[in-house]
Every structure is written in structure tokens, then in C-alpha cells.
Amino acid sequence: MPEPDDGPPGVLGTIGGTPLVELTKLAPGRHFTTYAKLEAFNPGGSMKDRSALEMLRRLIRRGALVPGRSVVVESSSGNLGIGLAQVCAYYGLRFICVVDPRTNRQNVAVMRALGAEVEVVSECDPATGEYLPVRIRRIHALIDRIPGAYWPNQYANPLNPQAHRRTMREVWEAVPGGIDYLFCATGSCGTLRGCAEYVRERRLPVTVVAVDARGSAIFGDVPMPRLIPGHGAAVRPALHRDGLADEVVHVTDLDCVVGCRRLAAREAVLAGGSSGALVAAVEQMADRIPAGARCAMVLPDRGERYLDTIYDDEWVARHFGDVSHLWKEPKSAMKEAPC
């Protein structure tokens, strides 16, 4: 099915162009301004829609991926799987996504609703204690077994970061005079690399801050089990390059929970776990950010898929104890609503 030269057809044409909003209530009185790029407004609900479309559309245009014959297989913690399921559903391609038990049930349900076949690996890799190496081994087994199988390989495909040059351009052009700091969560390193390369090639005066998980191998931490998917990796992705980030901030699972709950409580933004990581990273760096600086965070996805984890009080208490005071406003600071 050919595409017009001016962009993708149908619902896929709504990918990108997401809003950038100023966060005025998250930390009032700060000496710098913070903006949020709301990637939840993509049709599949995350910034991974951009990568999914970019990695497949050229192959579809050339006829290298053919409905009824080609099979797309990929490993995902959820969001890229949804993006690929959406593209494959539109073009009539079979799609198999390999996930693990940390993948949100809602993400799996969305993929299946879009026609994807979902395979769940249940064993951790003995060497790392993580699922990613096992997911990759399953991908290789599927490729060997299924004729016509194609693996986009988000961890090494240069079209993944290529998609996010547009993300950075949108952020830069949305703020008069541009921004001074970009906070970007890291997983496959696609968003980080695409944004950083756009900044460097155009010599923009932007400090790129990579936000990674404690226990992620991307920037040299010792790999360890993590609760919240979406950022961090047990193995350094092939897309990683030294020098992409000017600063690296590591955050914990609890940091992610607190950041997400603060976003929801103070800004009415219901976002996913990696967005909470970005909020925590800005907080960690706040004392080093100059007065008057303009900071932007790329919030990767929406929070509805985390309702039974991050936004569930019982789940939070079970894993972290009673920590609600970390995001709730003191009663003395709350104003009574008018009658």
C-alpha cells in the first residue's frame, strides 16, 4: 500500500506534533521554567509511535514488507510494541511481540486488541537477573523459525533515533528562544541519541541530560532487578554512544513513583513511570540549573497503563511502605474550596 510523499496515511499521520506545556504548579517558586513534551498525545499513547513508524514505513513503501507474507517480530516492554502493533494493523502485517512479566497488563491488552500476537518470557537471565537477554534470545528463535520474519531491532536500528530528530526540533521550535536543558529518559537510547544528534549538528546551546534507572547498565551501573519498565536496560544498547549526554542522572523506582504522583496531584498530568523519573531528575539537578533557564522534559507515555502499579496505593505500600507524604500537599497548605 503506497504512501503519499507528504506523510503517512490515516491515523499514522497523527504521529508527532505533540503539545509542549509549561508546568507551573509542580514546583512553584523555582528560579527556572519547566516544560513537558506530552508524548501521550500520539495515537498509540507514547513517543515509541514515532520510532515504530520510522522503522517500518520505508520497508513498506519499497514492498519489502508484504501483507499476508511478512512477519514483524520485536522485543518490547510495552510502548514500542503498541506502536508497532498499530502500524502493522494499519498495513495488514502480522506482528509478534516478545514481552516479560514486568510489562503492564494494559499494554499487552492494547497490543492484542490491535491484532498482535504476544509471547511472554518468564525466566530471568542467570547472568544479569534481567529479562531483556531472554527476550532477545526468543526473538532470534522466532526469526530462525518463521519464514519472512523481520526484526526492526529497536536497540540497534538507526531509524529509531532518526525519528526523534523531529522530536527535538518540535521542542526547540515550541519555546521562543529555544531551551537550555533537555531531560530525556534512556532505554534503547533512541530518543536520547536522536535529540542529542540534532542538538550537536545544529550547535544548539542545549545541555542534554540523560535520565537512567539505578541498576541499569547503560551508563555503567551494576545491573540489578527493577520494578518499573520503560527506562534503563540490563545490557548497553547498540545505539548508545559515548558523549551523547552532557549529564547523567540515575533515579530509583521510588523516585519514579513520587515523580508520577506529583505530576498527577499538582499538574493533572497522568503519565507513565519514565515521566516520573524525569521529574525526579529535574529535582536532583535543581540547585545547579541557572536562574532563568528553560528546561524541557520529554514525557514518554500516558499513565492509564500504570493504574494497577504506580497509581495504586496498595501496590506502592507493598513495595515502598507508606510514602504518600512525599507527594501529598500538607493540609495547612491546602485552601478550602469555595461553597
Image (spheres, helix red, strand yellow):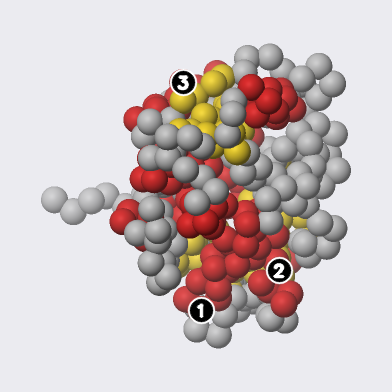
Residue identifier under label 2:
197
Q: CA distance from mark 1 to mark 2?
A: 16 Å
Taking the spot 42% from the left edge, 34% from the top edge, the residue there is 68
Q: Amino acid at mark 2?
A: Glu
- Asked if residue 211 shows in the view, the reply is no
Residue identifier under label 1:
173
Decide which of tag 1 and tag 3 comes sooner along the chain: 1
Decide which of tag 1 and tag 2 comes sooner along the chain: 1
Query: Residue 72, image x and y in percent?
Result: 54, 37
Q: Amino acid at mark 3?
A: Glu
Q: From the viewer's side, name the closer residue of 205 and 7.
A: 7
Residue identifier under label 3:
314
Taking the spot 55% from the left edge, 73% from the top edge, the residue there is 169
Q: Is residue 44 positioned above or below 15 on the image? A: above
Determine whether the residue tagged by mark 2 lies in a helix, strand or loop. helix
Determine whether the residue tagged by mark 1 lies in a helix, strand or loop. helix
